[in-house]
Amino acid sequence: MPQLLPQEDTLIPNTNNPADAINIINEYIEKYHCKNMSVDISFMNVLDACYVSTMCSTTHYIKYPDGKINWLISSSLVKEFNKNLELGNSEYIL
């Protein structure tokens, strides 16, 4: 009998401070099995979203080189600014 897989939860760091958001996300990555995860940073401005997604994608890659983070963003500029960093584990979703 096939089993239903649980729906993937979305992590929302409840802070406007990018350093605090990085700490929240990185602690989550360290504490839980989250090879594939989603993080909603759509409430952040473009520069903070770029900073947070870059730093946390790096932490996630170290633990899960074949994992993926779906970043929920509010502007396509975040994806545009980070495209040259070649973060192979990041997907940006508007």
Image: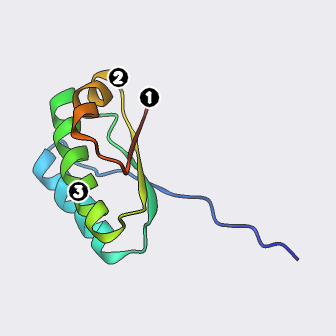
- Quadrant location of residue 60? bottom left
Q: By what rule are the colours in the image chosen?
A: rainbow
Residue lying at 30% horizontally and 61% vertically, measured from the top left: 61
Going from N to C along the chain, the mark reached first, 1 or 2, is 2
Q: CA distance from mark 3 to mark 2?
A: 20 Å
Please tell me which residue lies in front, 62 or 25.
62
| Badge 2 amino acid | Ser
Q: Judge from the rendering whether residue 4 lies leftward or rightward of residue 29; answer left or right.
A: right
Q: Are marks 1 and 2 in contact (CB under 8 Å)?
A: yes
- Which part of the image, by quadrant, shows the C terminus? top left
Between circles 3 and 2, the one closer to the viewer is 3
Q: CA distance from mark 1 to mark 3?
A: 21 Å
Please tell me which residue lies in front, 35 or 31.
35
Q: Which residue is mark 1?
A: 94
Question: Which SS class for mark 1?
Answer: loop
Question: Which SS class for mark 2?
Answer: helix
Question: Residue 3 appears at what percent x and percent y?
Answer: 78, 73
Going from N to C along the chain, the mark reached first, 3 or 2, is 3
Going from N to C along the chain, the mark reached first, 1 or 3, is 3
Residue lying at 37% horizontally and 51% vertically, measured from the top left: 89
Q: Which residue is mark 3?
A: 58
Residue lying at 43% horizontally and 55% vertically, measured from the top left: 68
Please, is residue 72 above or below residue 64 in the view?
Answer: above
Please tell me how crowded label 1 is: few (under 14), some (14-19), or many (20+) other residues with Cα within 10 Å.
few
Q: Which mark is residue 76?
A: 2
Please, is residue 77 above or below residue 34 in the view?
Answer: above
Q: CA distance from mark 1 to mark 2?
A: 7 Å
Residue lying at 24% horizontally and 69% vertically, measured from the top left: 27
Please tell me how crowded label 3 is: few (under 14), some (14-19), or many (20+) other residues with Cα within 10 Å.
some
Please tell me how crowded label 2 is: few (under 14), some (14-19), or many (20+) other residues with Cα within 10 Å.
few
| Badge 1 amino acid | Leu
Question: Residue 25 appears at what percent x and percent y?
Answer: 27, 59
